[in-house]
Amino acid sequence: MNFDPSEEQRLLADAVGKLLEAHAAVPRDPGKVWRDYADLGLLALPFPSQLGGLGGGPETIMLVMEAYGRSLADAPYLQSILLAGRVLALAGAAESLAPLLSGERRAALCLYEPGARYRWDTPTSSATRTQQGWTVRGHKLAVLDAPGVDMLLWPAATADGLGLFLVPVRTPGLTLDARPTPDGRPAADVQLADITLPADAAICPPGQSRAILAEAIDGATAALCSEAIGAMEALLAITIDYLGVRHQFGAALGSFQALQHRAADMLVAIEQARSITIFAISRLDAPAGQRHVAVAAAKALVNRSARFVGSEAIQLHGGMGLAAEYPAGRYFQRLTVIETLLGDTEHLLSEVERGGGLAI
Amino acid sequence: MDLTFTEDEHHFRAEARAYLLDKVPARIREAVYEEKPLPRAWMVEAQQILNAAGYAVPHWPVAWGGRDWSAVKRAILAEEIDRCAVPKPLAFNVALVGPVIAAFGSEAQRRRFLAPIANLDLWFCQGFSEPEAGSDLAALKTSAVRDGDVYRVSGQKIWTTYAHEADWIFCLVRTDAGGRKQQGISFLLIDMASPGITVRPIATIDGYHHVNEVYFDGVAVPAENLVGEEGRGWDYAKYLLGQERTSMGNVGFSRRRLDRVRALAAETAGEHRQLIDDPAFRRRLTLAEIELKALEILQMRVVASAGDPAVGADPKTSILKIKGGEMLQLAAALLLDTLGPEALTAGVAATGDNADFQGLDARSALLSAYFSSRKYSIFGGSSEIQRTILAKTVLGLGRQA
């Protein structure tokens, strides 16, 4: 075992950290931000070289996503690269993947439907074959980044099982109800009213869709855990700074033991979260069942840590924690979004139990 | 980065497990699994089996019986010893006094003590805590006054685990009462058979005898039993506390307890079904297993980054200490909750030290483990002390801005 990044990984992490900090310091046009990601190689990073990628492993993605979380970045990296891109790569849809890697296009995976909570594999969305191709109808909720992307990946029931469709957002009959996330990012509920798609919109055989989606979602979930760790680390650092400079009763807040111990418990929670995330990443190559249990276990614990660290940070800041222009509250908002994205705590704990638990 | 165990490490684990299960008698492993207090002779027997394979003191200098194994391998071994329900090597011997003698003792002391310490031919107990010196250890008062070739030791130690079984005690004593309280402390090895030592048992809520008070009344200790230099005992104590950390999280022990919770909950009928199928109980177990998996990785992270022990402990070991104690307590609470009404008749009969397992059976030993586990957040630097270390050392809180 060796938990130290290689020289190459360290250099990349430094470069990503600097770029994302620069983005955070001065608001920029999203198109420019995405070109910066492409120039640094981040868009091609997770894909194998035969698909035009750089072959970065999940440990490298972990470092990128920690930097992403630390700087509260908001480019659609998780959606367009780690979810949609990964699905296309696993499905062997090289032609559709290429413009995502180059940054020309962006895509988002639509997972949730009304009343189905986190169950994505039994959609009520449906697709029927026609002479020209497909007719697809359905309703997806809470699609992060949907308002800014070019294409949606849409799971739908077909006569042969779960299908997966590539839907251009400008397709007639597609309506997009944009709603911001609680941390101010774009998202939308999307409806398809019997839209017509060409035959090649179905991007993988029905028998494979479920396994491909599950693999992509597990990988992205592990990456999301790393984003949370980066955000929690930054939030703890901000909180420690505040405890050092804020004086009450003639002393820095950080000199009071009651507050010192709360800060120590935040550190403990972050280190536990980091450890279980490392475990999940080490299991991403395992058979699907074990992989999923490890990832679900990781995000469940990360979710709990995120809620604890976020709410403690606000409490230690006092009223300042509630001020919108102060960063602590923004990190808390981000952590809250992460908590509910790709599985909340109770859902994930149920997944761990359905998979037989972690006792091995 | 290599986030998984190597082939070599997997092989090492399998080899250790096979040896432990083959060589350590089942009667000993069953008693440990059921958390019964072991007879002294069984603990000696088990440690000698470990020592024969180099498993008792692998972290010691090679010249004194240590093995040149990586810290990761030593952590794997510590986990396996616990998971296989083999008694751990006596910590006072192998983790505490041994490394101090190896590092600071005279050549004569090393030759006299180290091999018997490793093999548990000599049993050491630890004389640190005093009635007025708990978390504030440096406030200790037990005095040692030089008188020709001996020190005259007077005072009282408390919470001394196994003092009633021990051959020797290593003590922090005050050789100089002036100056800062951390100065003037010395590290002495004292033969428990010396005239003037009285050991009194302390009855504890867990129902078996393990801790004691030790009184010293003008005990003559040969000056040659001073370890290192007079007045530097505090440094040696800090060195000792920065020693072997490969099992600080008690991961294997908690794992064993949670595995037992699963086994017991699967054979216990709850309201309408087995306890393991009760969603609320199952959820508590699931969370505990996840937290423990995280702790297992944290333990390996601390171990894999371990530097020179002379520079003291990685402050992250405080996290291991806090979470490790919490996990053992959580697992013990789950064990208790598998009993239901049977817990009502899990008291310990007043049979005394001489009955088998001090009168504890599988049921009462389980309650005993529950009560006893409160100690994990108290001894060796309470969880509050650990939080203060984290706040000050890692987070830098409390310094003057």
Image: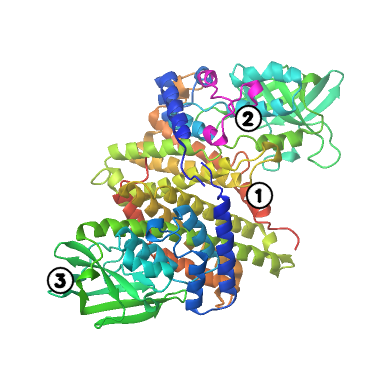
Q: CA distance from mark 2 to mark 3?
A: 77 Å
Q: Residue A129's spot in the image, x, y percent?
A: 14, 71
Q: Which residue is mark 2?
A: B160
Residue A209: which numbered mark, if any? none
Q: Residue at x 70, y 40 (%)?
A: B311
* Amino acid type assigned to the residue bearing label 3 in the image: Thr
Q: Residue at x 20, y 60 (%)?
A: A206
As drawn, is A23 to the left or to the right of A180? right
In the displayed structure, A247 sits above or below B346; it is below
Chain letter of disc 3? A
Q: Is residue B275 magenta?
A: no
Q: Residue at x 49, y 50 (%)?
A: A275
Chain letter of disc 1? B
Q: Quadrant of residue B399?
A: bottom right
As drawn, is A179 to the left or to the right of A316? left
Residue B389: which numbered mark, if any? 1
Residue A128: which numbered mark, if any? 3
Q: Residue A53's spot in the image, x, y percent?
A: 42, 60
* Tag 1–tag 3 contact (CB < 8 Å): no
The crowd level at tag 2 (other Cα within 10 Å; few <14, some 14-19, many 20+) is many
- Asked if labels 1 and 3 share a chain, the reply is no
Closer mark to the observer between disc 1 and disc 3: 3
Q: Secondary structure at mark 1?
A: helix
* Amino acid type assigned to the residue bearing label 2 in the image: Thr
Q: Residue B168's spot in the image, x, y percent?
A: 67, 21
The crowd level at tag 3 (other Cα within 10 Å; few <14, some 14-19, many 20+) is some
Q: Is residue B55 magenta?
A: yes
- Magenta region: B48-74
Q: CA distance from mark 1 to mark 2?
A: 25 Å
Q: CA distance from mark 1 to mark 3?
A: 64 Å
